[in-house]
Image (cartoon, helix red, strand yellow):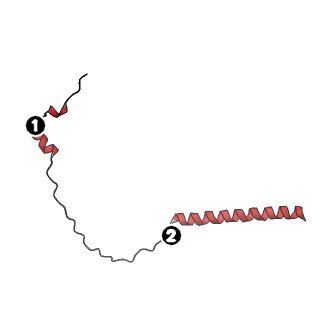
Amino acid sequence: MSPFDIDNVTIEFPDWSSALLNPPPAPMISITQHPTINTGVEPQQTEPFLTSIGVAVTLAVILVVVAGLLVYHKKHKAKSG
């Protein structure tokens, strides 16, 4: 198979294709920001639910570790005495 020279290829597009390939620029849209009026009391900030779960899990782990250490200490104190 012989190589193909693409430098000598010319493609002519129909007139409608230039409008599709080069669309006119979109108009600039400016958004005006108006000041907001706060007529009510600001809502109270509540503690996130995940923080409560984190505290509960931490306390449960600490409780289990302390209980395990108490049982371990009680068993080993009885054997050594």
Q: Mark on residue 56?
A: none
Amino acid on which the number 1 mark rests in the picture = Pro
Q: Amino acid at mark 2?
A: Glu
Q: Residue at x 51, y 70 (%)?
A: 47
- Rendered-image quadrant of the N terminus: top left
Residue 55 rendering spot, x and y as whole percentages: 59, 66
Q: Quadrant of residue 72?
A: bottom right
Q: Which mark is residue 47?
A: 2
Q: Residue at x 74, y 64 (%)?
A: 67
Q: Residues within 10 Å of mark 1 (few under 14, many from 20)?
A: few
Q: Does residue 63 sit above or below 11 in this rendering?
A: below
Q: Is residue 76 above or below residue 2?
A: below
Q: As drawn, is 22 to the left or to the right of 45?
A: left
Q: Position of residue 59 (x, y in %)?
A: 64, 66
How many numbered tags mark residues here?
2
- Residue at 81% over, 64% down: 73
Whichever of callouts 2 and 1 sits on the residue coming sooner in the sequence is 1
Q: Quadrant of residue 81?
A: bottom right
**How far apart, in angstroms, are the residues tagged by discs 2 and 1?**
65 Å
Q: Residue at left 13%, top 51%?
A: 24
Q: Position of residue 61 (x, y in %)?
A: 66, 62
Q: Residue furthest top?
A: 1
Number of the label disc, if any, that sits on residue 14: 1
Residue that extends furthest to the left in the rendered view of this protein: 15
Q: Nearer the viewer, mark 2 or mark 1?
A: 1
**Foreground pick, 45 / 66:** 66
The picture places residue 77, in percent across and down from the top left corner, at 85, 65
| SS state under label 2 | loop
> Tag 1, which secondary structure?
loop
Q: Nearer the viewer, residue 72 or 34?
A: 72
On the picture, is 3 further left or further right than 11? Answer: right
Query: Which of 81 and 3 lies nearest the eye of the viewer?
Result: 3
